[in-house]
Amino acid sequence: MAATVPQPKIFACQKSKVLAEEIAKAFGQPLGNVITSTYSDGEFQPSFEESVRGSRVFIIGSTMPNSDNLMEMLLMLDAAKRASARHITAVIPYFGWARQDRKDKPRVPIAAKLKASLLETAGATRIITMDLHADQIQGFFEKPVDHLFASTIFLPYLQDLGLDNLTIASPDMGGSKRAYAYSKAMESDVVICYKQRAKANVISHMELIGDVEGQHVVLVDDMVDTAGTLTKAADLMMEKGALSVRAICTHAILSGNAYEKLENSQLKELIVTDSIPREHRSDKVKVLSCAPLFADVMHRVNSNTSIASKFVM
């Protein structure tokens, strides 16, 4: 008699537990039981309090700094591997450390490649993530990577706004591909901001390529950190005659004085997902859940059905 294949099991890293509970609910089963013990010096040890032998295991956790979030994911992957899980999928809604995806000057690390190696060594047999900072990070892995696009979440919201004279904008040259994909879906024009940085998170100069006069503008980007680029772009576009400026950013890091910048800017609305756990301190922030997207893809992975529709911008 053929052995029965165990049901998949879903576990959560501590900081991502709220999102993981929503994903598990949408998936149709509760989170698995994990207990984390902590030593007095800050070292911690996660422990699965149920058998995962022969199971397909999904471990959910965004890996934003500090490094404890990445370390927790690695420890849980290692624990699942040593407990003889059949398949181990790291579900990483926000793939932190991805901005270090190349050597842009001598003697610096490529953190995104290092992280890929760590995840695979720890035991991940598959990665599910969303809106990587650079698409080519997928090439750092030897295991399958399901790179989902949050456009499947944002586009229905944009369409429901019913804005006439809509223009999609990219806050920098690197995001032009994403902007063109959104503009194609919305059948709108595109403008691009050209910026120069004095150093990380500091913009020295910004210019607008294109016309926004009389337009409702939507900036699209993969993440918002200090909000310096978005707020500067929004103010510039309003000076150039835009009727309103909104922004869509998948990952809401919002560090430093980002909320103050948002409140003092002419940005009408910042639309984000809940990939990074955070209590937002601005009424301008609109949060859309990514839980249904991840739950759907996890179902498809478990049943070996196509997820091609989730790759379409």
Image (cartoon, helix red, strand yellow):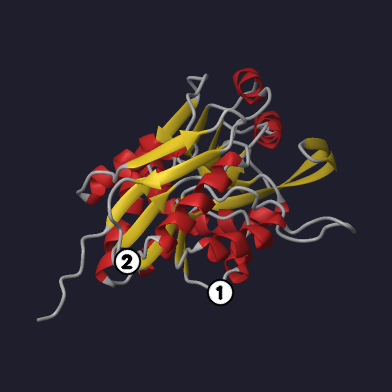
Q: Where is residue 103 in the image (x, y as percent from the top left)?
A: 81, 60
According to the picture, the residue beneath numbered tag 2 turns out to be 301
> Residue pushed farthest bottom?
1
Within 10 Å of the Cα at label 1, are there few (<14), some (14-19), or many (20+) other Cα atoms?
A: few
Pick the front one: 235 or 123:
123
- Residue 124: tell me if it is visible: yes
Relative to 56, is 279 above or below? Answer: above
Pick the front one: 209 or 303:
303
In the image, what residue type sits under mark 2? Val
Q: Marks 1 and 2: CB-CB under 8 Å?
A: no
Quadrant into which the N terminus falls: bottom left
Pick the front one: 151 or 23:
23
> Residue pushed farthest front?
40
Relative to 63, is 126 above or below? Answer: below
Where, by quadrant of the figure, is residue 80 drawn? bottom left
Q: Which residue is drawn at 38% across and 38% down?
A: 35
Q: Position of residue 205 (x, y in %)?
A: 84, 38
Q: Residue at x 16, y 75 (%)?
A: 3
Q: In this view, does 103 lie to the left or right of 268?
A: right
Label 1 vs 2, first from the N-terminus: 1
Pick the front one: 72 or 169:
72
In the image, what residue type sits under mark 1? Glu
- Residue 249: tell me if it is visible: no
Q: In this view, does 31 lie to the left or right of 12?
A: left
Relative to 293, is 237 above or below? Answer: above
Q: What element carries label 2?
A: helix
According to the picture, the residue beneath numbered tag 1 turns out to be 142
